[in-house]
Each structure stands twice: as structure tokens, then as C-alpha cells.
Image (spheres, rainbow, N blue to C red):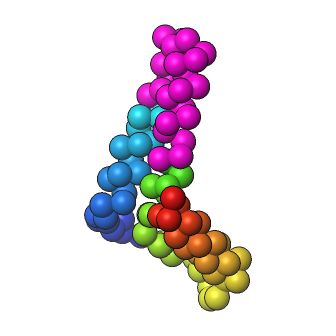
Amino acid sequence: MRARNVSHPALTEFATIATAFCETVENVASCTPEMLLDQIHQLLPRAYSAALQLPETSVPFNDGADPVNASLSQTRRRRSMQLQRV
């Protein structure tokens, strides 16, 4: 299967936040517990919000309607709307 070149602003935003989170976890030894908690407290909500903005994807081996994924998509949209109201 050929990889597709996908570009979407939400991917860039999510990757930036995910990178910052990974760097925070990788550098845990250089932080006080308070600093670590503060950084994670700031990054996790941003990562969750950015993840909700990611574009919909399809499964390469999807063989038809999947009620579980349809339900998850609806849940993602509702949560995204709730976060936008805050």
C-alpha cells in the first residue's frame, strides 16, 4: 500500500503538542515534581483538545459500516463542541 501525503493544520498542532509532552516526560529527571505536574497539567488538556480536531480517518481493512466507530465519531464531535463552548 502506498503511503499518502496528508497535510492538515490539526495534524501540525497535535504533533507540536505531542512533541512537547514527550519532551517533558523524557526530561522528568531534570524537573521538580511540582514543575512536572504543572507542565503536564498545561499540556494534557491541549493535547486532548487538539486530538479532537484531527481529521476523520478510515481503516484500510474496513469491510463496511462499523457502528462502534460511528458512535465514537459522534462522541468526538459532541466533546469538541463542548470544549469550544468553554
**x, y (%) of residue 72?**
64, 72
Residue 29 point in image, percent of width and height: 54, 12
Count of numbered labels shown in the rendering: 0
Task: Quarter of the image for the N terminus: give it.
Answer: bottom left
Main SS class of the magenta portion in the image: helix
| Above-or-below relation of 85 to 18 | below
Highlighted range, magenta = 23-46
> Taking 2 as reference, is 29 left or right?
right
Residue at 48%, 33% in the rendered image: 22
Determine the residue positioned at 63% across, 72% down.
75
Q: Is residue 74 magenta?
A: no
Front position in the image: 50 or 5: 50
Q: Check the image and report above or below for 54 versus 30.
A: below
Which quadrant of the structure image shows residue 76?
bottom right
Relative depth, front residue between 36 and 81:
81
From where the camera sits, is residue 59 visible?
no
